[in-house]
Amino acid sequence: MLSALKKVINVSGCEITIETEFPEFRQGDYIFCKVQVVGGEYEQQATSITVSLEEAYWESRGDYDGTSNQSYLRRNKIEPKVVASDLLIKTGETHSFRYSGKLAQNSCLSALDSNENHPHHLEHHTAGWFLVVNIDVPKAKDPEQRVKIQVNLCKEVSTILDALKQEIGFIPAFRYSLLGLLNKGDPHSTYNLNGRRGNKFRLDPPHRLKPHLDFLDLELVMRSDKTVQCKLVFDKTTEKSVGGFFKSLVNEDKARKHVIFSKEDLFDESGDPRYQHVAEIIDKEIQAVISGS
């Protein structure tokens, strides 16, 4: 039943209602929605009505030291589909259409709206994922409106992150992207890895590991065979000395480990997450780093 998310917007005098199957989605999900158009006060001829998914994010440009940074909102339309062509929309008349689009497996996540630590807090609500409706009206500026949707981590990546938090005690530190620090308190982002997107997290170690590790950078990429490529970058605790300082300059204070998680590693036969098993695999790599330090 299409009732989990329902938004009513106004486009060029027409009342447009968008309904989706679910209130939230995960990376890699299909998004199915119903679009209903009700004619306004005046009869209108629409060359076409297009619905698309849209990814919006802030891109920063400026000096390396951040003294003259400027931010630009980038919008990428994904899977635009024409749901109606040469449509006469009469006053009070109702037209209904269906739309479907697929999120990429390693798509960006929705932005957090309420985090006051974000450098663009007042603007940040405009970033994230949207369903966009565009009406092509002859000899007029084509009006469009957006409805925000929530996109969360896929189940596979979420299982690995939750295992680190629940079973080992790591604490999310802050969010990274290729453009730098985006949002303190938001532990995740997407990034490009050799032309592919992935999820990147920085995590603080639990108290028992702090003598050995300063933090953990976790890079996770969902692959087409449903396995997860996991890169663990451990920032090892170094002595507060000149030697320790130079080790950090040449990255000798970092250790890198690679793990591939299969579906069987992540879930049992019932489809429930195997948090303890995932944690045991990662803890083995942690102990190898500690013993080799």
Image: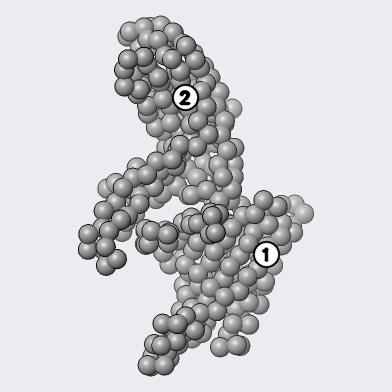
Judge left or right: residue 162 versus residue 265.
left
Crowd band around label 1 with a 10 angstrom C-alpha radius: few (<14), some (14–19), many (20+): some
Residue 281 place in picture, x, y as percent: 67, 71
Which residue is at 44% across, 87% downward?
Answer: 247
Seen at 63% across and 62% down, the residue is 229
The residue wearing badge 1 is 260
As helix, strand or loop, the secondary structure at mark 2 comes to strand
The numbered disc on residue 50 is 2
Instruction: Say what amino acid the circle numbered 2 marks.
Output: Thr
Q: Which mark is residue 250?
A: none
Which residue: 62% across, 55% down? 222
**Residue 216: image x %, image y %?**
50, 72
226 with respect to 132 (left or right): right
Relative horizontal placement of residue 231, taking residue 174 as reference (left or right): right
Q: Position of residue 177 (x, y in %)?
A: 43, 59
Sooner in the amino-acid sequence: mark 1 or mark 2: 2
* Residue positioned 54% across, 55% down in the render: 195
Q: Amino acid at mark 1?
A: Ile
Secondary-structure class at tag 1: strand
Give the quarter of the image for residue 147. top left
Mark 1 to mark 2 CA distance (whole Å): 40 Å
